Amino acid sequence: MIYIKAMLIIFLSFPFLFNIQSAMAAPPENELNQYLTELGWTKQELLDYLAYYEIPLEDFDTIEDLKMIMGTPINSANLQELRTKYNLTEKELNDLLDHFGDSLNEYKFIEDLDASLDFYVNHDDYMADVEAELERLGITEAETERFFNYLSLVEENNKNQLDQMPLLDSRMEKFYDVADTSELAEEDLNELVEILNQTISLYEIDVKFSINNKAVTLKDLLKMKELPANLVASIYTNTGELLIDFTVPTEFFDTGYVLDEGEEMLHVGELSNEYVDHMHNEKYENADKDMK
């Protein structure tokens, strides 16, 4: 049941409050344009950055307030200090970022890079263990990283939508001990399919199964007693981009080992959620300190 557990990506939501008094204004346009020139950003890039942290530009009436929240641009000196802080060579830093599908080019401010490295250093071994387990299914490291990054975006863009996950998880509990879904009553099987499809929808992914290149539905798959040869599971974004594609090994269909492997997929989702929460929390805490 790897294909079932893979869809049960449970995100834990932690509310963080951004304590900046909102002013229905924005920094003067000429000062804002000068600041954008210094950053080498367009206004849309600034708005996208603020949107990630759920901070409206209208919350700032001066450039000084905005700069305080944005952080310190990366330079050779503070980058070296950060590498020293984490005892990382230039190669080790780049390798660590790459392990999570990230890169130094994604960062403009040293505080954001610091927050990411803090998370990555403390989860690098865990991510490696997850990747090693998923590799046994034929899921590559690149696919795991791509999945991680996509789920981070889903978590960021669908916070209210994902509030439905605890309810779905609660409904799913009755099926956790089911060893053979083919023995479920029709009513229970329909409920299971409904839960899984709702979960899939929440995470804006499209899951497709095929046997010998012929499409098969999730319900038909759950009714099978034995795994047919050449069962392929493919996970796409809702815009059609392939995230993960692998042939389900026969032994994983018949043994309890499948649940362990499914948990590893679950952990990718949990890890991506923790990362988003960590980045937001660090930004808000730094902002709160600076505003005091």
Image: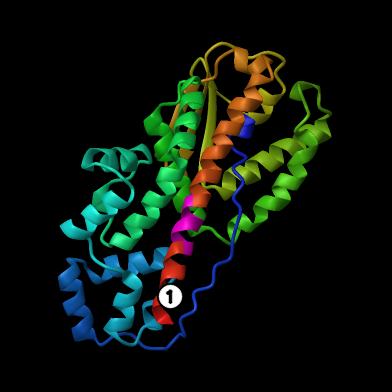
Q: Is residue 75 visible?
A: no
Which quarter of the image is occupied by the N terminus? top right
Residue under the image location 43 percent in, 49 percent down: 119
Pick the front one: 215 or 286:
286
Where is residue 68? Give x, y as percent.
33, 76
Residue under the image location 26 percent in, 68 percent down: 72
Q: Is residue 249 visible?
A: yes
Query: Looking at the picture, does residue 147 appear above or below residue 161?
Result: above
Q: In the rendered view, how is the structure colored?
A: rainbow
Query: Looking at the picture, does residue 236 appear above or below residue 41?
Result: above
Where is residue 163? Give x, y as percent.
64, 58
Pick the front one: 275 or 92:
92
Label 1 Cα neighbours within 10 Å, binned few <14 / some 14-19 / many ≥20: few
Residue 250 as seen in the image, left or right of residue 118: right
Residue under the image location 28 percent in, 54 percent down: 82
Instruction: Place residue 200 in its image quadrant.
Output: top right
Where is residue 206? Give x, y as percent.
52, 39
Q: Secondary structure at mark 1?
A: helix
Residue under the image location 28 percent in, 56 percent down: 107
Instruction: Place residue 251 in its image quadrant.
Output: top right
Residue stretch in magenta: 275-281
Query: Looking at the picture, does residue 196 appear above or below residue 163?
Result: above
